[in-house]
Amino acid sequence: MSASVRTPAHSTSAPSPASDSPSSAAGPTPAELLDFVRRTATEADLIASLPLDPEGRTWIRLDGPAGSEAWLIGWPPGTGTGWHDHGGSHGAFATAAGTLKEDSLAARLPTEGWKTLELAEGVDRERHLPAGEGRAFGKHHVHEVRNESGTEHAVSVHAYYPPLPLMRRYSRTGPVLRLEQVERPEEWQ
């Protein structure tokens, strides 16, 4: 597994993809990506190699399985991604150290042609992922991930397939989700 250090100028999120179909020429499935991130999250030397910044997230790009994109991400206390999707990629992530909180939407949102949506009641999901736990997700997944600790860094491993073509960032006020920005890979690599 080769790695190169990427340190953001400001807090942005690093990617995570996977696919909704069985493993084939189409690449790894979400379950295969989950297996990869869980195994990688146990590699103590790799986890220890991530430089941690007291204020901003840091990351190392990794080689994921079967053409996928993977990242090792450091989360200072109180940092998060904000609401975003993965541009049609599926993925998985696992916590290697600390605890992460994920808020997600149990609704399939249109990927194009809208700027503001009002979400129905009951679509919000919340999960806490302590070290050793992870989750896979499909290509329509919208979520935000945070390290809510006031004192400890968290570290996680993420993988996506196909490699992230873009990420859409959203703001949220109550039930209203608003598209704010579209990021391309060159902005986080």
Image: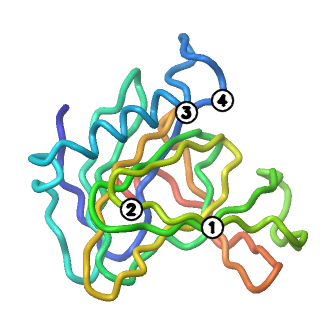
Horizontally, residue 119 falls left or right of residue 53, namely right
Callout 1 environment at 10 Å: few (<14), some (14 to 19), or many (20+)? few
Observer-side mark, 2 or 4, equals 2
First along the sequence among labels 4 and 1 = 4
In three-dimensional space, the C-alpha distance between marks 1 and 2, rounded to whole angstroms, equals: 13 Å
Q: Position of residue 154 (x, y in %)?
A: 30, 68
At 66% from the left and 63% from the top, the residue drawn is 104
* Three-letter code for the amino acid on which mark 1 is drawn: Glu
At 84% from the left and 62% from the top, the residue drawn is 114
Please report contact status of discs 4 and 3: CB closer than 8 Å, yes or no: yes
Residue 126 is marked as: 1
In three-dimensional space, the C-alpha distance between marks 3 and 1, rounded to whole angstroms, equals: 19 Å
In three-dimensional space, the C-alpha distance between marks 3 and 2, rounded to whole angstroms, equals: 20 Å
In three-dimensional space, the C-alpha distance between marks 4 and 3, rounded to whole angstroms, equals: 6 Å
First along the sequence among labels 3 and 2 = 3
Reading the image, the residue beneath label 3 is 30
Rendered position, 34 above or below 105? above
Q: Position of residue 9 (x, y in %)?
A: 30, 74
Secondary structure at badge 4 equals loop
Observer-side mark, 4 or 1, equals 1
Reading the image, the residue beneath label 2 is 130
Secondary structure at badge 3 equals helix
Residue 114 is marked as: none
